[in-house]
Image (cartoon, helix red, strand yellow):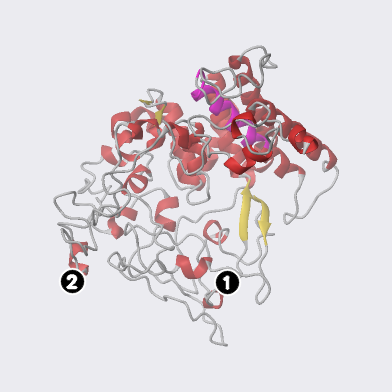
Amino acid sequence: MATLTEASKRAPRNMVARFILEDLDKAALLMSETNYSSQYINRDLALLFKSRVALYEATWLKYFKGTAFVPGGEGWPGASYNPDFSYPSGSIDEEIKFFFQQAMAAAKEVGDKYVGNLTANTGKVQQSADEPANPYYNMFCDEDLSGYPEVLLWRQYGRGLVTHNVNAAAGRGNQRTGLTRGYVQNFLMADGTPVYTHGTYADGDGYYMGDKTIADVRVNRDSRLSVFLKEPGQKNILFEPDNGQGTEVVPVEPYPLITLGDDERGYATGYALRKGGNFNRKYYANGGGYTAAPCFRAVEALLNYMEASYELNHTIDGTADSYWRAIRTRAKVDPDYNKTISLTDMNKEAENDWGAYSAGALLTDRTLYNIRRERRCELLSEGFRDADLKRWRSYDQLITSPAHLEGMHLWNTPMQNWYTDLVWNEANANVSAPEKSEYLRPFERTEGQAAYNGCTWRMAHYLNPLPINELMLTSPDGASPSESVLYQNPYWPLVAGKPAEK
């Protein structure tokens, strides 16, 4: 027990982050002379992950500075465990600088190597077997990703061995996971302008076509939206195998099945993604998909460098400029990011993006905001969003101002005519009522839903609580959480089954 207790002592988070960086440096050094397959960990991957860790810690320290969430902050629960704590760099500001510099250096080494070798994007969705494929689309659904240098690590699947259901889910409603209205509106027009500079969100001005049909939403947009956002009538299958494989297939995209309670086939917001769905029917067996999964992409290094360098130096240097233009060019968006910055209205972005906030305040730096926007659009549905919003401290405003999430424009649009079974203002409602909003509100159909009154937040939720049994096991008598060598995360109780305190 004494050995376990000693080994369980909790170190300040910045020291843990420093340890991770040192470990990754060693890994990168040991792999520096070998050109590993992209199915194995390699030097570039170690450096990319280093940039991710360093950027996370730098921004966390910056935006939580002075709070209980950082070492030395007011109410930090680790204070009594570390009475002599001091930052190795001398101060929290110098520690933030250290981590930003580490993120920049690691990201630049990877970014410079791959900026000229990003996967090509035709900007179109293949709609016949005779059309050329879009490599950018296929990077997320091909069976073999060894031909995509941008993919630094990928997982292989094999029919009858290790399989998944990604294709079947993408052919339907992605297990009722959909894009929000705010996310869709956040994507730029192809000429680099925000959509709200082109008339109202609903109607547009002829270049931005408005949002009264899903087809209109995709016109003249950032190709990362137009390529991956599903549209009724699109072909989901272009290649038919000879052996009848693919029983869980939807060959042609239907109108969004928003009134279905079926989690497998229903559409939560009406806006659904086809990202990850292959055009070959053979991958659509129930639980039998075997397309590969990209785990790390080099483009993240470009995004990490852009953010870290701007956060540290408050300017777009030559490297960040070349990276940003490469990303936008690949996305078929005007590479002149300064045009976008000059037209950005933060009050409008506040309607679309929680990432427009930090520590409860709307950002005033439009360049920093657009770097965040670029990250959001490029890493669409790749598992980064919650971590980004937490390290930017972008949930604070929800503590006092609940957010009402919306999906597609349903009421008073042609899309309303797709449905003959709409029910609202009843205990068995299957859509939100028109008096709430013309846009579908998936959490506000019936009063029994958890977020019926809006999505909220508590400060404690920036970190998960440590399990009480772990605190007990690491206490001197094995039963006293308050005496543990571990310490509970801020605002979480030392009693099981109790909610957050703040």
Q: Do we see residue 328 in this rendering?
A: no
Q: Position of residue 90 (x, y in %)?
A: 66, 12
Residue 458 image-quadrant placement: top left
Q: Residue at left 47%, top 49%?
A: 380
Quarter of the image where the C terminus is located: top left
Residue 171 image-quadrant placement: bottom left
Q: Is residue 86 left or right of residue 426?
A: right
- Label 2 – label 1 distance at C-alpha: 34 Å
Name the residue carrying label 2: 420
Q: Do we see residue 409 in this rendering?
A: yes
Mark 1 crowd level (few <14, some 14–19, many ≥20, 10 Å Cα): many
Examine the rendered structure and indicate whether residue 296 appears above or below residue 252.
Answer: above
Residue sticking out furthest to the top = 90
Amino acid marked by disc 2: Thr
Q: Is residue 223 left or right of residue 309?
A: left
Q: Position of residue 184 (x, y in %)?
A: 35, 48
Quarter of the image where the N terminus is located: top right
How many marks do you count on the picture?
2
Q: Is residue 9 magenta?
A: no
Q: Residue at left 17%, top 58%?
A: 413
Pick the residue in front: 58 or 451. 451
Residue 427 image-quadrant placement: bottom left
Q: Residue at left 55%, top 19%?
A: 313
Pick the residue in front: 458 or 231. 458
Amino acid marked by disc 1: Gly
Pick the residue in front: 222 or 460. 460
Q: Which residues are magenta?
A: 50-66
Name the residue carrying label 1: 289
